[in-house]
Amino acid sequence: MIRLSIQARQALARLTLPVLVLASFALMLLGKADALLAEKARSALADGLAPIYRMLADPIEHARASWDEVVDLWSMREENARLRAENEQLRRWQSVALALDAENQRLKAALHWIPDPDASFVTARVVADAGGLYAKAVLLSLGPNHGIRKGEIALDDRGLVGRVTEVGSRTARVLLITDLNSRIPVTMESSRARAILVGTNNSRPRLMFWPEGVSPKEGERIVTSAEANAFPANLPVGTVHYAANGVPEVEPIAQLQKLEIVRIFDYGINGLSGSAPIPSPQDKAAPRPKPAPLHITPATH
């Protein structure tokens, strides 16, 4: 074994870095001078390392798959526990709903209840968010002889959208419940107290003029009232949320920001004017067919 002196080892240590730098520059110059040779060298190196990569990739892939299975099993346990709790809650609500439905049927039979006639409706597509005289209104595209009249009620698949204010031969304009000119008689579902829903040109209309001694509750459902013969009763409108300044506002159930399809219902009411609408050529069209009853199911917030 060759033993080097301390001076020799120090000299070699000082030469290591310059030699590596010179070798790097030589390899760079060689790669620039002969690109084909450098490419062959890289390919040969990659071919030589490929089996090693494959040998290392399989255990790593198995380990990753095993870890993903463990994570999925853990999350599945949490998901199953949540679903069991929700199913139990739904069973309790089903029992309550069945009992209430049976009681409701008995009361209707005792009172000889006459149900309201089913409302007919026409489905229309929203083609523009054009307010015209109003800040919050949408324009609907209709077919000829649609039979729609002013004052009819517009709903989406969740709840109340607004009211028809203008009718043309192939279009109709709907005033949204958020418009500043909108005034809707409503009922607070928990207390059954009456109030007026006033548009603010913002995303949430405001509750006003409720009876003394009653206050809207946070999260309370708001439905329409039949006061003034303007709207049918119990159409879902939204839920109460208090603003930062303490004013009760209503978060609409209808997706007013993403309206695409709207249904115009004819409930046979005369509206706030108290008189029947002036006949128009569209009103002389054949009456609309009455389809199967539509049940509006409010969204859960």
Image (cartoon, grey):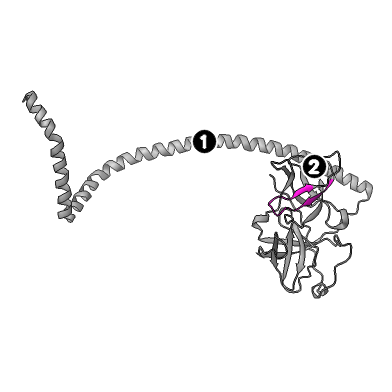
Residue 14 x %, y %: 13, 32
Q: Residues within 10 Å of mark 2 (few under 14, many from 20)?
A: few
- For label 1, the residue is 73
- For label 2, the residue is 98
Query: Which element type, helix, strand or loop, lies under badge 2?
Result: helix
Q: Which residue range is magenta in the image?
A: 194-207
Residue at the right extreme, as displayed: 111
Q: Nearer the viewer, residue 135 or 187?
A: 135
Which quadrant of the structure image shows residue 98? Answer: top right
Q: Residues within 10 Å of mark 1 (few under 14, many from 20)?
A: few
Quadrant, the C terminus:
top right
Residue 116 as seen in the image, left or right of residue 2: right
Q: The residue under label 1 is which amino acid type? A: Leu
Q: Nearer the viewer, residue 230 or 75?
A: 230
Residue 41 as seen in the image, left or right of residue 197: left
Which quadrant of the structure image shows residue 54? Answer: top left
Q: Is residue 196 magenta?
A: yes
In the image, what residue occupies the spot 76% across and 73% down?
A: 145
Name the N-terminal-most of marks 2 and 1. Answer: 1
Inter-mark Cα distance, 2 to 1:
36 Å
Residue 16 x %, y %: 14, 35
Residue 285 x %, y %: 80, 74
